[in-house]
Amino acid sequence: MPLTVHSLWQKTIRSAVVSARSIAKVCRGLLVFFLVGGCDLTGKKSLTQPSLTREERLKFARDSYAKEQCKKQWAVLWPLAREGDGEALSELAYELELGLKMPATDSDMKGDAHDANVTVIAIYGAAKHPDGKSNLNYIFDPARWNKDDVKVVSIRSGSIIYSSINPPPPASMTKLKNCLFQANSSAAGDLCVAQAIELGLIPSFPEYSTAMDAVLATYRAESCTPRPW
């Protein structure tokens, strides 16, 4: 084949490859748009809608939070978290600790109520994934428990409510914290969860995820709290 013709073919092939990559990039951008631009936050319709892979969801959530673009965090993370994905639960707890708002009105979700939900999500995350252990020092900060009473999440008639309980004995809290730090398997994590439920700190996960689905069907999280840094 003459050199000029061969060069022309190479140029044509390179152009086709570049075009294909550009199209793929645009399609991926549209996929992200459709995923977070008005989807079902509970994840129940995910089988009939375009969706990102698990890894893409987690990366998209982390990148968005780093840019303080929090409006779609629940839409991205909750479909994984509601299925018991420990990494998604841990990421959600971490972002809630740093200022991501719960999907509720301001009158529904203030200080102690917010922390009560963080406790639930962080404990289940730590029981299921090593990354969740980084949230435990926040959850077990003595300042949160050295009170006459503390608020915890309860489920009543399928809805999330907030109950006041006497703080568990310090020895029980230390035992639970150590259990979660040391858990290195699903079975070990389940034993820690059983302790937390027995102490009255968290509801069962199926109850909580179902109740949170109902919250997400009504409310939309608007943003994250402005950060001082």
Image (tube, rainbow, N blue to C red):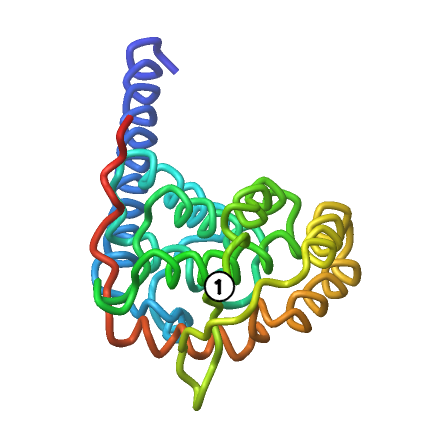
Q: Where residue 52 sits in the image (x, y, percent)? A: 41, 54
View extreme (front): residue: 148
Specify the quadrant of the image occupied by residue 22. top left
* Residue at (40% x, 45% y) in the render: 95
Specify the quadrant of the image occupied by residue 219. bottom left
* Residue at (49% x, 68% y) in the render: 152
Q: Where residue 21 sits in the image (x, y, percent)? A: 33, 35
The disc labelled 1 sits on which kind of residue?
Val
Q: Give above or below for 217 relative to 78.
A: below
View extreme (bottom): residue: 157
Q: Nearer the viewer, residue 166 or 81?
A: 166
Q: Is residue 19 left or right of residue 97?
A: left
* Residue at (62% x, 52% y) in the render: 126
Location of the N terminus by quadrant is top left
Q: Where residue 211 sits in the image (x, y, percent)? A: 42, 78
Location of the C terminus by quadrant is top left
Q: Is residue 31 left or right of residue 203?
A: left
Secondary structure at numbered mark 1 = strand
Q: Nearer the viewer, residue 198 or 15?
A: 198
> What residue sits right under mark 1 in the picture?
150
Q: Nearer the viewer, residue 26 or 9?
A: 26
* Residue at (42% x, 62% y) in the render: 78
Q: Where residue 118 sits in the image (x, y, percent)? A: 46, 56
Q: Is residue 122 left or right of residue 60?
A: right
